[in-house]
């Protein structure tokens, strides 16, 4: 049953109609991008050069490959962890426990893949089945989201998400009804957010790099940069895995189609678009421009990591010496808000750093095509929308103190611009 609080929550993403449209549009966009990246003109806008038939999309062996991958990541999740962390307090005052072994899973996957490659595993061939792989991953996500929806029917009211319980089947299926669906210690949302999709993304990038080596004798500098930057991003996410426990996805959003598709399809298949593009459209890149792009990525990473670490340290241990000199304002909830340091520059400095990195990931692909810049534009739109959602939640949480924060720090993401 929906919680009374859930029933009153305002509808997001254009309500049931918007949710239905997104459930069609997002998979279609993912397939369009995959097709466009390998086509000659590589057009972001406009129809794809050819429409694939069912025989190009459906392949039971690829489904088996996907299930093996999910099984492997689930097994790595269940291995003993170096630490077990507690999540934020839930409505019923309890706290869930989460294994912190994501980086270990990345290392073990790298070891297994390395052993496989040295034993003759043709990893580069993965680049040839991306289309059917994305297709079966999409089908799997629909089935998985249906099972999550059914599971929520028997969840206690205190376990339901504030937003995904409107009573409308389509909307709730999309948003996700249960906040933290679990079987025992296995937390589906936490698992999907950081493991199969993120690690799958860098594995796909590596496969594209190997395929380029096979085709052209060696990987291009542009391919090295894209692989390196995105590996740093994924490695960082898993190294600071505990920080994900305070993100909006874990603390606020239900686990339904939106996040499941985002984690399992959108991230691995569209975030690897630059490497896909480079395999089929090699781009010359000289050392001076490569160094400039590395500098841009380093600046973005510095801001992203600095801002995220500052807030996480502040929330976990406000008396930590590294943040001792920062100015804060009190709120009625007892929690304080940072108004100096990174969080005194703009209200979402971590988004700014993330966006600068997004630009650095596209720049190695040159400026002849719009397609590799898709991630940058999509991500800017996602963060503007996400920022607006977070503002609303913070206003509800902190009221007047949030107003004061907005007055002291007037810009949202980009200083003096937005
Ligand atoms: N690559 C990708 O596709 C995506 C990446 N991201 C990245 O994920 C990271 C996490 O983002 P996200 O979960 O959206 O949100 P944030 O990490 O920005 O967290 C927002 C929360 O931080 C707290 N907060 C806000 N302002 C302050 C302040 N001044 N002082 C102290 N606490 C404050 C509030 O929660 P409270 O006060 O309750 O602690 C607020 O709800 C970001 O780096 C983002 O760029 C996000 C989405 C997609
Ligand atoms: C399909 C829709 C268009 C929207 C789906 C959004 C999801 C793809 C993103 C929502 C929040 C995310 C986060 C990360 C990846 C993308 C999704 C799932 C993140 C794991 C990336 C790495 C970062 O370091 C992080 C802070 C851990 C991110 C957390 C949020």
Image (cartoon, rainbow, N blue to C red):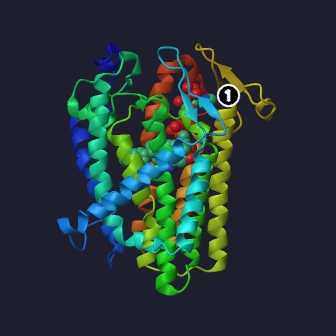
| Residue 304 placement (x, y as % from top left) | 62, 47
| Residue 369 placement (x, y as % from top left) | 41, 72
Q: Which residue is mark 1?
A: 316
**The furthest residue to the bottom:** 217
Instruction: Please determine whether, in this image, residue 17 is positioned above or below residue 272.
Output: above
SS under mark 1 = helix
Front residue of 26 and 261: 261
Front residue of 84 and 172: 84
Report whether the residue tagged 1 is closer than 8 Å to ligand 1: no
Query: Horizontally, is 309 left or right of 268 in the view?
Result: right
Query: Horizontally, is 238 left or right of 9 in the view?
Result: right
| Residue 360 placement (x, y as % from top left) | 56, 62
Query: Horizontally, is 413 left or right of 162 in the view?
Result: right
Identify which residue is drawn at 26% across, 64% down.
Answer: 59
Front residue of 124 and 336: 124
Q: Residues within 10 Å of mark 1 (few under 14, many from 20)?
A: few
**Image quadrant assignment for residue 327:** top right
Q: Quarter of the image for the N terminus: give it.
A: top left
Instruction: Please determine whether, in this image, residue 274 is positioned above or below residue 220.
Output: above
| Residue 376 placement (x, y as % from top left) | 47, 57
Identify which residue is drawn at 53% across, 86% down.
Answer: 217
Residue 163 appears in the picture as rendered: yes
**Image quadrant assignment for residue 130:** bottom left
Residue 345 appears in the picture as rendered: no
Label total for image: 1
Instruction: Please determine whether, in this image, residue 99 is positioned above or below residue 198.
Output: above
Instruction: Please determine whether, in this image, residue 398 is positioned above or below residue 201.
Output: above
Front residue of 165 and 293: 165
**The furthest residue to the front:** 119
Identify which residue is drawn at 31% across, 46% down.
Answer: 141
């Amino acid at each position: 049953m929906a919680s009374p609080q859930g029933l009153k929550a305002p509808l997001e993403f254009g309500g049931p109609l918007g949710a239905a449209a997104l459930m069609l549009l997002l998979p279609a966009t993912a397939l369009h991008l995959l097709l466009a990246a390998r086509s000659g003109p590589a057009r972001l806008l406009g129809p794809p050069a050819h429409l694939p038939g069912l025989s190009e999309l459906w392949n039971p062996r690829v489904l088996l490959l996907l299930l093996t991958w999910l099984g492997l990541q689930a097994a790595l999740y269940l291995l003993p962890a170096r630490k077990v962390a507690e999540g934020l307090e839930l409505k019923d005052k309890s706290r869930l426990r989460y294994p912190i072994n994501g980086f270990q899973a990345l290392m073990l996957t790298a070891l297994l893949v390395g052993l496989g490659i040295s034993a003759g595993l043709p990893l580069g061939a993965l680049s040839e089945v991306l289309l059917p792989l994305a297709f079966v991953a999409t089908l799997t996500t629909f089935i998985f989201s249906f099972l999550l929806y059914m599971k929520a029917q028997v969840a206690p009211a205190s376990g339901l998400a504030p937003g995904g319980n409107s009573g409308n089947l389509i909307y709730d299926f999309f948003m996700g009804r249960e906040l933290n669906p679990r079987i025992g210690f296995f937390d589906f949302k936490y698992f999907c957010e950081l493991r199969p999709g993120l690690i799958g993304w860098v594995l796909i990038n590596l496969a594209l790099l190997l395929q380029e080596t096979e085709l052209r004798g060696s990987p291009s500098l542009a391919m090295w940069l894209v692989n390196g930057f995105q590996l740093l991003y994924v490695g960082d996410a898993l190294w600071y895995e505990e920080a994900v426990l305070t993100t909006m996805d874990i603390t606020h959003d239900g686990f339904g189609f939106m996040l499941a598709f985002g984690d399992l399809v959108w991230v691995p298949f569209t975030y690897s678009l630059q490497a896909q593009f480079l395999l089929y459209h090699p781009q010359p890149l000289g050392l001076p421009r490569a160094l400039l792009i590395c500098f841009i990525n380093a600046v973005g990473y510095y801001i992203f990591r600095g801002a995220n670490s500052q807030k996480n340290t502040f929330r976990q241990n406000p008396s930590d010496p590294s943040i001792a000199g920062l100015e804060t304002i009190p709120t009625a909830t007892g929690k304080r808000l940072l108004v100096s340091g990174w969080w005194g520059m703009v209200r979402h400095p971590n988004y700014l750093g993330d966006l600068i990195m997004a630009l650095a990931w596209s720049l190695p692909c040159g400026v002849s095509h719009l397609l590799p810049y898709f991630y940058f534009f999509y991500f800017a739109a996602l963060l503007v929308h996400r920022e607006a959602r977070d503002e609303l939640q913070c206003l509800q949480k902190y009221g007047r103190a949030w107003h004061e924060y907005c007055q002291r720090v007037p810009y949202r993401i980009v200083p003096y611009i937005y």
